Image: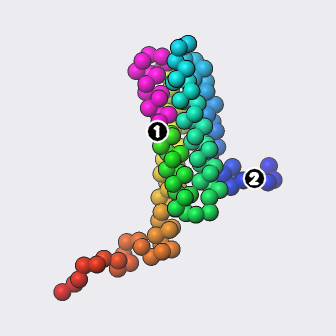
């Protein structure tokens, strides 16, 4: 693909898309009468992808990091939904193993992106550690 959006180059975006397919497979395997879980899992998994894309397209570092935090929250929500499905014995535990592995990877990458943005912003503004920002007086 010659022309790509910024978010399409992010590994976390690509893994998140893979997770959407995995989450959809889990959702389709749930028994009838659990549409609330199906809907929530599909919405939360889509939210990871959408917030990651929005974050990558944001010019403001503060907003960029905010979108990555929202994507991270959606990923942990998906993990909790998988836990609910396992606890209620709606899905076999082995069915959730690949999805949980993807979520751990996604959350880790999103935390790293958020930290790198925060660190870069602090360096640019001079508010990071070791910049003499303390208000305490030395005697």
Residue 84 in the magenta stretch? The answer is yes
Is residue 19 something one can see in this rendering? no
Residue at 79% over, 54% down: 3
Within 10 angstroms of label 2, few (less than 14), some, or many (20 or more) residues?
Answer: few
Q: Position of residue 76 (x, y in %)?
A: 46, 39
Q: Is residue 49 left or right of residue 89?
A: right
In the rendered image, the vertical position of residue 129 relative to residue 99, given as above or below? below
- The residue that label 1 is drawn on is 76
Which numbered marker is on residue 4?
Answer: 2
Q: How is the image coloured?
A: rainbow
User: Which residue occupies 47% across, 33% down?
Assistant: 79
Asked whether 28 or 101 is in front, the reply is 28
Q: Nearer the viewer, residue 36 or 15?
A: 36
| Closer to the camera in the image, 113 or 32 | 32
Extent of the magenta region: 77-93
x then y, percent, for residue 77: 47, 36
Residue 134's disc is none
Q: CA distance from mark 1 to mark 2?
A: 28 Å
Whether residue 80 is visible to the viewer of this picture, yes or no, is yes
As displayed, is residue 56 above or below residue 121?
Answer: above
Tell me the chief SS of the magenta region. Answer: helix
Relative image position of residue 68 (x, y in whole percent): 53, 51
């Amino acid at each position: 693909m010659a022309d790509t959006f910024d978010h399409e180059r992010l590994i976390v975006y690509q893994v998140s898309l893979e997770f959407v397919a995995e989450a959809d497979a889990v959702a389709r395997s749930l028994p009838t009468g659990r549409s609330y879980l199906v809907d929530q899992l599909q919405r939360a998994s889509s939210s990871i992808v959408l917030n990651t894309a929005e974050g990558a397209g944001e010019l403001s570092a503060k907003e960029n990091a905010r979108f990555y935090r929202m994507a991270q929250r959606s990923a942990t929500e998906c993990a909790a939904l998988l836990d609910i499905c396992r606890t209620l014995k709606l899905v076999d535990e082995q069915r959730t193993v690949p999805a949980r592995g993807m979520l751990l990877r996604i959350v880790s990458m999103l935390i790293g992106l958020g930290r790198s943005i925060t660190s870069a912003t602090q360096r640019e503004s001079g508010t990071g550690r070791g910049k003499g920002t303390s208000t305490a007086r030395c005697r």
